[in-house]
Image (spheres, rainbow, N blue to C red):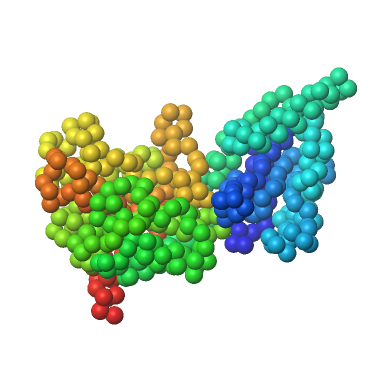
Amino acid sequence: MRISKQEFSRRRKALMDQMEPNSIAILPAAPERVRSRDTEYPYRQDSDFYYLSGFGEPEAVLVLLPEREHGEYVLFCRERDKDKEVWDGYRAGPEGACQQYGADDAFPIDDIDDILPGLIEGRERLYYAMGKDGDFDRRVMGWVNTIRAQVRTGAMPPGEFLDLDHFLHDMRLYKSAAELRVMREVGEASAAAHRRAMQACRPGLYEYQLEAELHYGFATAGARHQAYNTIVGGGPNGCILHYVDNSAKLRDGDLVLIDAGGELEHYAADITRTFPVNGTFSAEQKALYEVCLRAQLAAIEVIKPGNHWNLPHEVSVRTITEGLVELGLLEGEVDALIEAETYKTFYMHRIGHWIGMDVHDVGDYKVGGEWRVLEPGMCMTVEPGIYISPHEQSVRKKWRGIGIRIEDDVVVTKDGCEVLSAGVPKTVAEIEALMAQAATG
């Protein structure tokens, strides 16, 4: 594991330090999901659960009890089972939960109904993320109601429920040195996969064949799972923001937009590149691409401590609006076009999102009604785009069907920012040189 037991312990301690006195926190593991009949989707642990434990098995519940004499970190998990392990793989069991994952105390998950109400009883406050898992919500309320039914005998149920997400998600927003090492690693692996796809691309291939090149690149670097559904959109398909069909043939003269990232040890990369299927940008493609690239570089330039979250987006909107006016795709004064949001015909999304254990990571974008101020350790994507629908009648035909997005992952540093996905070419000259090298090599 790339994150140490000591770091997981520090995270739990930091969370417990924020909890009110005489409280308890409860987090369930992610459930397994059926894919079809008796097969499941590949299991992925809930990000909050993994952030605090590093424990990757299903059917588990994490409990934090600050100042508990017999141990503050309790884990309920599956018992060792020789027969089931033959079929489904190794289980840590309660003993392994303590030895390998740092639990102070651990119990079989089948005993939770007998044990957990006793841990909740007497605690004044219960921290829990209500609403994420309806089945588990009902179990929590069942345990609390069991205690309430015993009030006449002196039992004391929690009198206050508090949202665990509020504290935990703010912690996750600030990445540690160890987390950033993993994010650099998955960023480099994903960048290499994007380069591989660029070099493999040629007219006549299908979108899914480039998808296969990407997934091969992720997996051989240890990132066996994608952070999200891979987008490979050739020609007009690049104008569909969440296109995942990936079934069309790539045509000579079109661009192809690839939005793809691997996941390594629960940390995501999110990279988008747009390049010509035949290796050479047309005049119109190059003109729009360079506007988009200018917007991305200008946005990255203002990512630094003290600037607010929305400033990179504002910069990208102005740069793209100015560029579209220069090219004649928009007409009017730039300020008026921005105020009227006319640019949204061609740039309809925001410039990015937090990134970390979830590709669209947790963390508030506003605090007290104001845009959040950027601080070191925050990680975000920067992904301006320009999309000219093939059906857009307000522009000349030569522009239609061109979709462009350029995306990188960026961490705020003490005096600016660092691009974690810088290993993929993104200037016109760099892209054309890499693709020409592959074609002649």
Q: Tag count in the figure?
A: 0
Residue 336 appears anywhere in the view: yes
x, y percent for residue 73: 74, 46
Residue 248 to residue 397: above or below: below
* Pick the front one: 242 or 155: 242
At horizontal 62% and vertical 62% (from top left) the residue drawn is 1
328 and 392: which one is in front? 392
Q: Is residue 183 visible?
A: no
Give the residue drawn at x 66%, y 28%: 161
| Most distant residue in the right direction | 153
Give the position of the C terminus as an image quadrant: bottom left
Residue farthest along the top direction in this orientation? 152
Residue 380 appears left or right of 384:
right
The residue lying at 40 percent from left, 35 percent from top is 371
Q: Residue reaching furthest front? A: 37
Q: Position of residue 57 (x, y in %)?
A: 67, 53
Residue 272 position in % (x across, y down): 35, 55
User: In the depicted view, which residue is nearer to us: 164 or 247?
Assistant: 247
Q: 271 above or below 395?
A: below
**In the figure, residue 337 lies in which quadrant?**
top left
Q: In the rendering, at what x and y percent does residue 184 appear?
A: 47, 61
Q: Residue at x 24, y 73 (%)?
A: 436
Camera-side residue of 414 and 153: 153
